[in-house]
Image (tube, rainbow, N blue to C red):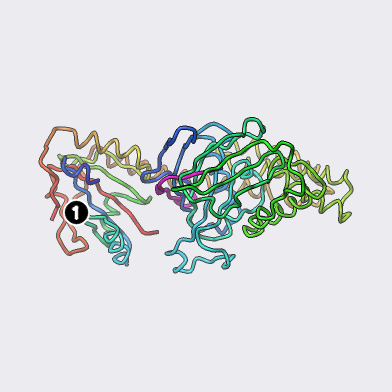
Amino acid sequence: MERYSNKGLVVVGINCEDKAEREARFARSKGLSYPILLEAKPIFEAYGTRGMPTNLLIDREGIVRDRRVANWGEFEKRIESLVEEKGDSTPGRSPR
Amino acid sequence: MVATLSFALVGVLGGRLQEGNGGGLARVEPGLQWVYDGTLSVGTTTEREDRREFKVRLHYLALEKFGDRSVRVALVQKVDPVAGAAGGEKRRPEEAEGTVFTELGPSLLRPKPYGAFWFKRANLFLYLAPFPPRDVSATAGEWRVPNRLFETLPSRSNLTGDQVWTTEPEEGGVRITCAPASPPISRGEFNPTTLEAYRQTYIVDRAEGLVKAFERSWRVRSTEEIEDAAITLRLVESKEMTPDELRTRTAEADWITTTEMMVATEEDDLDALVKRVETALPRFAGSPLRAAAEDLRGEIDRKIDRLKKDRAWWEEDRKTGERLLGKAAPEFTGRDLEGNEVSLPRLRGKVVLLNFWASW
């Protein structure tokens, strides 16, 4: 993902488990550097997410442009086309 | 024989086999036609039909991807340390982590349990590679395998009587060669290490078959034939069956195996399967395999139920997708691990990837 972040891609990890902090810290220790929201059941519900992992792409206008369960390969192509779209080339900043 | 490169993660959701992050095709090194490398993770597979389905699905994955029956699937088993700590039961606790290797492929279609399924929960590492066809002249060749998969296998394997396989460790991997055995290997050349390797991996039938076949100077051409030889010998020698009976039972068992496979893989025309089973059942009237044949009928019903649930699940998921696409993403604000605020509205102007995940 690093390779898209300088083209304006921001990644947010969302976990719905009650006690996932340990796992999340583990993920962080393995080099996942993006922000991870824990115990985020309301977000899961708002997006109707059931299958894991689900990836969802939101464009620069805040519109949902793609959503896939698993199947990463296809998804990556979509990320590529979306970050190339309407070239806002300011590097993706951390959402903090 | 097989090889691997880096792993990629593939998940099984509710028994479904799915390619996941990074799974992909790879071709490396001329002469070694690497077709796929990846990791499969299988969830708890305690149900007999789940295990069978998983096996058959693996085989179909191979066929689907490469359309070639000579492609074999190999699984290397690794205990999932997390699941293990959480109480994932090991049926064979003496089995060492990460060393069990079994080659599947055509044998996936056989109903025998292989080592890969001894664990209720394990990570199965999948390697697909074109396996040389059985014709001896065509199998001669040399493969360089960039991993240590075979380090526990014997350096000279006389498995088939028609071929000699040698595996030699070399830097960064192993070199495998296959040459026709000329003249065919005699019993005197039988490699006890091969036998020991089988015993250690609990493929006992193969080990026994190997011994007996060599004792009789049989020329068996595959591990499947060795297994069949072992079963045949055991039954006939113990006078449990006359040769005629054995033929009948074998045909019945073949029918059951084939039908089981159809039940496990068929997704569209299950009615035809019901018909197939019901038409055949009278033939099993006096057979000891009658119960197994009748069980197939129940298995089809369970399969139909499962498919309905599966389809409903995916349909629901599809509708969710349709509802969201092209619409404004539901807004949310939350705090991340470090307690920093993450707010979707404030990310306007950026492409945002939401990665919903769970550790299960």
Look at the image and give the residue range highlighted in magenta.
B3-15
In terms of secondary structure, what is the magenta stretch mainly? loop
Q: Which residue is mark 1?
A: B332
Q: Residue placed at 40% from the left, 59% from the top?
A: B360
Chain letter of the residue beneath label 1 in the structure image: B
In this view, the residue in front, B280 or B356, is: B356
Q: Can residue B62 be seen here? A: no
User: Which image quadrant is residue A92 in?
Assistant: top left
**Where's residue B7, x and y in %?**
41, 48
- In the rendered image, the quadrant that contains the C terminus of chain A is bottom left
- In the rendered image, the quadrant that contains the N terminus of chain A is top left
Q: Residue placed at 22% from the left, 43% from the top?
A: A3
What's the residue type where badge 1 is placed?
Phe
Q: Is residue B58 left or right of residue A26?
A: right
In this view, the residue in front, B282 or A4, is: A4
- Whether residue B282 is situated above or below residue B206 in the rendered picture: above
User: So how many labels did they put on this image?
Assistant: 1
**Where's residue B324, x and y in %?**
27, 42
Q: Is residue B77 left or right of residue A40?
A: right
- Whether residue A26 is situated above or below residue A84 in the rendered picture: below
User: Which image quadrant is residue B186 in?
Assistant: top right
Q: Is residue B66 left or right of residue B217?
A: left
Residue A81 among those drawn in magenta: no
**Where's residue B25, x and y in %?**
42, 37
Give the crowd class for mark 1: few <14, some 14-19, many >=20 residues within 10 Å.
Answer: some
Q: Residue placed at 46% from the left, 39% from the top?
A: B36
Q: Can residue B202 be seen here? A: yes
**Where's residue B70, x and y in %?**
59, 35
Callout 1: SS: loop
Q: Is residue B25 left or right of residue A77?
A: right
In this view, the residue in front, B284 or B136, is: B136
Q: Residue placed at 14% from the left, 52% from the top?
A: A94
